[in-house]
Image (spheres, grey):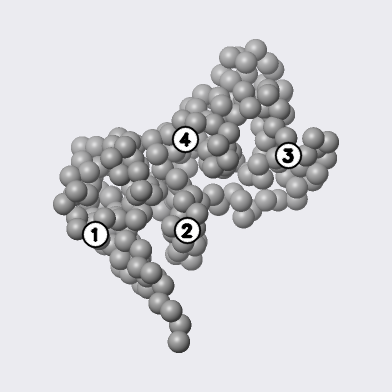
Amino acid sequence: MKTPKPMIHIGLADDHQLFLKSLTLMLHSFGNYMVVLEALNGKELCEKIPLTQLKPDIILIDVNMPVMDGAAATKQIAALYPNIKLVALSMNNDDHTIINMLRAGCCAYLLKDTHPDELEKALHEIHTKGYYNADAANINFRRLLFAEQQQDGHRITEKELGFLKYACTDMTYKQIAHVMKLSERTIDGYRESLFGKLQVQSRVGLAMEALRRGLIKL
């Protein structure tokens, strides 16, 4: 007889009620996920958490909401409830928005058009590992080849670490080059090198993997 999976409690915050209800139904269909809290904005979410008997293990937070947005709510919840895993959920995939949510305290960033199978996988990894980085499962040949050619293996140099700290802010690569007094081509080289060494494909993946490995602190 199969041992039933433990129930994972989920909180949701999104100002679109139709999406909120649809997501609730989808999560319940996964079998071992129970939505214990729904909110229409960040302020309502923060007010409901202490009143909720079953505290959520994971909270999916929309980025753009009225009254209190996702970043502000994330900062407040992360400070008060460090055991709750916070996940950004949005239609935006620009670097500034994503890094802003990671800096606020999110352990993952999911797009609203994520396939249900991918969402279920992400939630499982977030619950078991504490983070989810989709880039880790999509390393292409170019990245592997580049990493293989590195004589120093996966050792990150002091200059690369300096670049990495700037890359995890909202600065553009051009601004980073200016601050580090380096050419944009050199900055591109650091980026490509770190993509290979950390086995990621995007700036978001870079920031998340750097946080996971303790290379940077936000």
Label 4: state its secondary structure.
helix
Dividing the picture into quarters, in which one does residue 166 lie? top right
Disc 1/disc 2 C-alpha distance (Å): 19 Å
Q: Disc 4 versus disc 2: distance between alpha carbons?
A: 23 Å
Residue named by callout 4: 99
Compared with 131, 27 (above or below) is below
What SS does tag 1 mark?
loop
Q: Which mark is residue 154?
A: 3
The amino acid sitting under disc 4 is Ile
Q: Which amino acid type is shown beneath numbered disc 3?
A: His
Question: Is residue 10 left or right of 137 when viewed as pictured?
Answer: left
Q: Residue at x 66, y 32 (%)?
A: 191
Q: Mark 1 belongs to which amino acid?
A: Leu
Q: Is residue 124 above or below residue 140?
A: below
Q: Which mark is residue 54?
A: 1
Q: Quadrant of residue 162?
A: top right
Q: Which mark is residue 44?
A: none
- What mark, if any, has residue 128 been given in the picture? 2
Examine the rendering and report whether any part of residue 122 can be seen: no
Q: CA distance from mark 3 to mark 4?
A: 24 Å
Name the residue rendered at 34%, 56% in the picture.
57
Helix, strand, or loop for circle 2?
Answer: helix
For marks 3 and 4, the one nearer the N-term is: 4
Q: Are marks 1 and 2 in contact (CB under 8 Å)?
A: no
